[in-house]
Amino acid sequence: MPSEFDIIRRYFTRPVKRALLGVGDDCALIAAEPGAVLAVSTDMLVEGRHFLAGADASQLGHKALAVNLSDLAAMGAAPRYATLALALPEADESWLAQFAQGFFTLADAFGVELIGGDTTRGPRNISIAVMGEVPPELALRRDGARVGDQVWLSGCTGDAGLALAHLNGRIRLTDAALAHCLARLHTPLPCIALGLALRGLATSAIDVSDGLVADIGHIGERSGVAVELRYAELPRSRALEACTDESLARGCLLAGGDDYELAFTASADARGRVEAVAAELGLALTCIGSVSAGEPGMVSVYDAAGKIMQPECKGFDHFD
Ligand code: ADP
Ligand code: MG
């Protein structure tokens, strides 16, 4: 059986280039570049809550880091460092090797250095903190949306929710749709390049982790504005278009969660610049609504006839 220190040395000690000091001391030492500040965020994945016992270790390593990097993307920060606190029921070396492979493949893709953490026996729990850099005046905060701004969404929502509906037996996806939706659920990619491109362009941003309506509601609350969304204009994947259970499709689009797309606002004048970013990055960016005066945090969804819908729009509450 490897000891705690064997595990740290074998699986989680990598040389660092940017950090002044990485794994192995009481603390890591880091500094932000001149003109930048550190953007810091933590997200935890708990077995039985965020993933099932027996989940693929490599995908868990990927996803645990991806959901954290998604928060840096939503802040317009460039990813730099991560720490990893792991509780594991046993020191399973094949699990550790696969987890580390999934984690470091994604970390390398985004230039993230693992600089510390904690390792202990316990119910399986993966807690990661990430640090990125951003000039403070360019950070994409939630509180900058203004009445008249347009609301944009990258990619589309709903696919991870569809995958869950399939796994729970509520629908049966075709093999191709299932493969697509499972990849969205288990190996999401954080929208880092988009976050960086939106610096100085978006007036506010958030990553869609808990459901589109709920997360856009957070922008509304923090900005003191209401938001109007046009249901017919929400982008949909082929898998979602093919879903004949209209109520499920609507639930997935508006409240599915686990999407890790960026929702953001920009002034109407900036429309051409947003479209130029989409073209440059080869991304779909869709204008899905607008910011209005009204009850702060209220998100209204309108159908194609301009009628307000009664959406199942509650977001994911972790204490449900
Ligand atoms: P301490 O007793 O000071 O908490 P530890 O013995 O827990 O230190 O950890 C030793 C070193 O290994 C520290 O630098 C810590 O940040 C690092 N470390 C521990 N677990 C992990 C992990 N899972 N991933 C990365 N670094 C880790
Ligand atoms: Mg420790």
Image: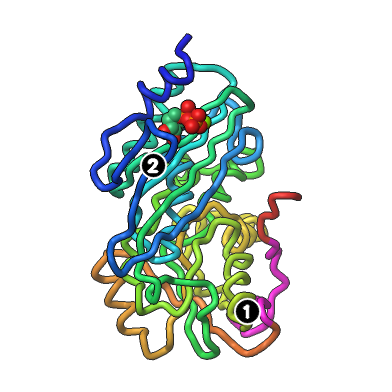
| Residue 59 appears in view | no
Is residue 30 left or right of 44 when viewed as pictured?
left
Q: Could you tell me residue 15's position as x and y percent? A: 26, 34
**Mark 1, secondary structure of its residue:** strand
Q: Is mark 2 within 8 Å of ligand 1?
A: yes
**Mark 2, secondary structure of its residue:** loop
Q: Could you tell me residue 193's position as x and y percent? A: 31, 61
User: Which residue is situated farthest in the top direction here?
Assistant: 1
Q: Image quadrant of residue 27? A: top left
Whether 90 is among the magenta residues is no
Q: At x 35% / y 60%, what residue is drawn? A: 133
Residue extent of the magenta highlight: 296-314
Q: Amino acid at mark 1?
A: Tyr
Q: Image quadrant of residue 283? A: bottom left
Is residue 236 left or right of 20 when viewed as pictured?
right
Whether 303 is among the magenta residues is yes
Q: Which mark is residue 28?
A: 2
Where is mark 1, residue-wise? 302
